[in-house]
Amino acid sequence: MLFSAAVRVCGRLRLVIQRPPARVCPVMSRLFHSDSQGNSVKDKAKSTICVEGNIASGKTSCLEYFSNTANLEVLTEPVAKWRNVQGHNPLGLMYTDPTRWGLTLQTYVQLTMLDVHTRPSVAPVKMMERSIHSAKYIFVENLYKSAKMPEVDYVVLSEWFNWITKNIDLSVDLIVYLRTSPETCYQRLKMRCREEERLIPLDYLHAIHELYEEWLVKQSSFPVPAPVLVIDADKNMEEMIQHYEEHRGKILAA
């Protein structure tokens, strides 16, 4: 838009056309910064690593191990939010009655995971616990396949997910899949004694395991957004540290 202004030059009025200051595209402003001379410099690309796996597969321990790595930011699942939404516990409600509360929880999971994906990173490498992709391809899918989520709920969540992934950049550079047997997960789950998880049966862990295998190993169910590094996570912590050290170069080079 152009603006006009009248100025007096040598006793006569003259119309001067003024252009407004150029707007800066908010997306481009995140991609560029100014150097000490004021020149526009493109920022170095940042990478995102998602650590995936069954419940009690060792994801939190993996993130804790890499949390001391320079230039890497760790973002855990926002479980605390899922347990307390203004005094309500949708996570606990879902485990108690998945048919009634599955949509409620997974809608909030989708929102909070979107927030984690799009949150500005303070380091060149961002390592996330799970992703918005596994929220949909594993946990929503399990509710629907087990007949605990009505088709209309499933369709609504799918429409939301498809719009999000089509319109928002949720790029992932590497998926680290901690491949753990359901039996191992079940034993670990019992040992950590989280209130909401006491209702989880072994069959549920088997179902989640199969969905992960189809998605990340066989790659036969849904799109895989990044290369996959599979790590055998049936080991104890000492052995897992050795695994992480062996694969450190591959993981941090994402």
Image (cartoon, rainbow, N blue to C red):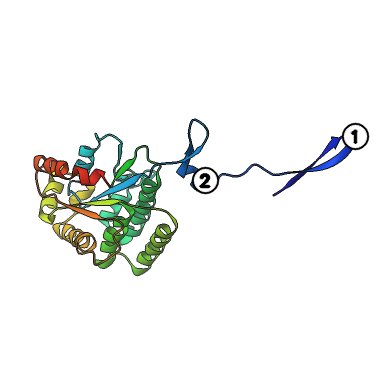
CA separation, marks 1 and 2? 44 Å
- Identified by mark 2, the residue type is Pro
Q: Relative to the observer, which residue lies in front, 158 or 174?
A: 174
Q: Are marks 1 and 2 in contact (CB under 8 Å)?
A: no
Q: Residues within 10 Å of mark 2 (few under 14, many from 20)?
A: few
Identified at 85% across, 35% down, the residue is: 9
Left or right for 201, reference 105: left
| Rendering coords of residue 229 (x, y %) | 20, 52
Dot 1 lies on which element? loop
Instruction: State whether residue 89 appears in this view.
Output: yes
Expressed as whole percent of the image width and height from the top left, the position of residue 6 reads 82, 40
> Percent x, y for residue 239?
9, 42
Q: Residue at x 25, y 35 (%)?
A: 69
Q: Secondary structure at mark 2?
A: helix
Query: Relative to 214, is 152 on the left or the right?
Result: right
Labelled disc at residue 233: none
For marks 1 and 2 on the same chain, the one whose residue lies earlier in the sequence: 1
Instruction: Find residue 170 and report its horizontal and vertical position in percent.
Output: 38, 53
Location of mark 2 (residue): 26
Q: In this rendering, is residue 109 above or below 203? A: above
The count of marks equals: 2
Q: In the drawing, does residue 39 fall left or right of residue 44?
A: right
Q: Which mark is residue 11?
A: 1
Q: Of circles 1 and 2, which is in front?
A: 1
Camera-nearest residue between 42 and 195: 42
